[in-house]
Image (cartoon, rainbow, N blue to C red):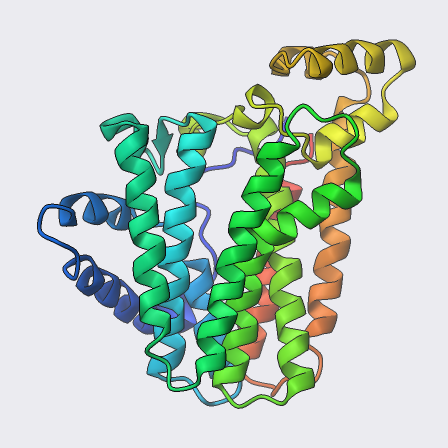
Amino acid sequence: MPTTLTTSDRFPFDLVRPHLDKVETSIREQVRAFDPAVEPYVSYVCNTSGKRIRPALSILVGGAFGNLGEEQRKLGVILELIHMATLVHDDIIDGAVTRRMVPTANAKWGNGLSVLLGDALFSHALALATEFDDITICRKVGRASREVCEGEIVQTQRRFDLSLTKADYFRIIEMKTGALFAAATGIAAALSDADEATEQRLFNYGLRLGTVYQIYDDCLDLVGTEDAVGKTLRTDLEKGKLTLPILNLLESASEAQRTKLNKRIIEQEPLDLSVLVGIAEYEGAIESAVDTACRMLDDCREDLSGLPDNDFTAALHQITRFLGSLLEKCRR
């Protein structure tokens, strides 16, 4: 069995904690910008504080270049609002009832209001992005936001789809998760006056890091427990999302087991975890997904080559090691 995965697992953000505190203050200020009738709903979503990975990445990149200021923090606030909007919509699509140990917006107020709440967060984030002096920054935020939505659309469209390839899977998670990580690091590099080649390398770092994080989340959906993780699990199985561990299993299972799994998928029956665990190749499918993610983390470290040698760059490296340690906990 994997080591227990818990909500106490925290990314190593101590170096930028004062800046993240300012991000929290700014998010609370943005909540007050909404109509008084809407503010309580926005406040509820924003106050169920997450890891703030995207703001931390923006701040760390700014610090790596010695150019850390209000613009990187503002970018972090914008991306976090977009991220929270996607979570509201994700929970509706997945029928999730808990996130971060509390009821989801859809569990409290229903799908209709929650859809509009997510829309309001998206809209407000994009309005904030127009305040940057450089219009290209707003365009980049807009493109990242669009990619996230496109990724969610394609993933929903390809549920219970046996023609989904691993290449399709990676493209989907690059869009739905990697895009905001890439925006955090790539746009922060642009705001820090990095040259074009360095900006691209940091964009790639964020894209890969976000992709790895999604693979970890997909493994966690199978091996984690709801009490420890703090959110509804097994939704991927129930909704027919063919994640990397499942694709690995379909590839490696015996012909008889593959036929049974294919039949359930074709008939759009939920994939019960007990069925998967009973397949001999199940553990290997998880292992293979973890191995793939760990190789991508090696590429992330290469993306950081040539950055200034300072504590902020060291922290960007440390994040890859920390994420690697989380992945190792998924091994059975």
- Residue 124 sits above or below residue 61 on the image: above
Measured from the top left, where is residue 282 in percent x and y?
Answer: 76, 23
Q: Is residue 55 in view from this perspective?
A: yes
Q: Nearer the viewer, residue 29 or 232?
A: 29
Q: Is residue 284 in view from this perspective?
A: no
| Residue 124 in the figure: left or right of residue 65 | left
Residue shown at 35% from the left, 38% from the top: 100
| Residue 247 in the figure: left or right of residue 80 | right
Measured from the top left, where is residue 48 in percent x and y?
Answer: 28, 45
Q: Quadrant of residue 135?
A: bottom left
Q: Quadrant of residue 208?
A: bottom right
Q: Which quadrant of the figure contains the C terminus?
A: top right
| Residue 299 in the figure: left or right of residue 188 | right
Q: Quadrant of residue 316?
A: bottom right
Residue shown at 78% from the left, 40% from the top: 166
Residue shown at 29% from the left, 51% from the top: 120
Q: Nearer the viewer, residue 31 or 56?
A: 31
Measured from the top left, where is residue 265 in percent x and y?
Answer: 70, 16
| Residue 324 in the figure: left or right of residue 188 | right
Measured from the top left, where is residue 163 in percent x and y?
Answer: 79, 30
- Residue 140 sits above or below residue 329 on the image: below
Residue located farthest toward the left when viewing the structure as drawn: 36
- Residue 1 sits above or below residue 199 on the image: above
Residue shown at 62% from the left, 23% from the top: 240
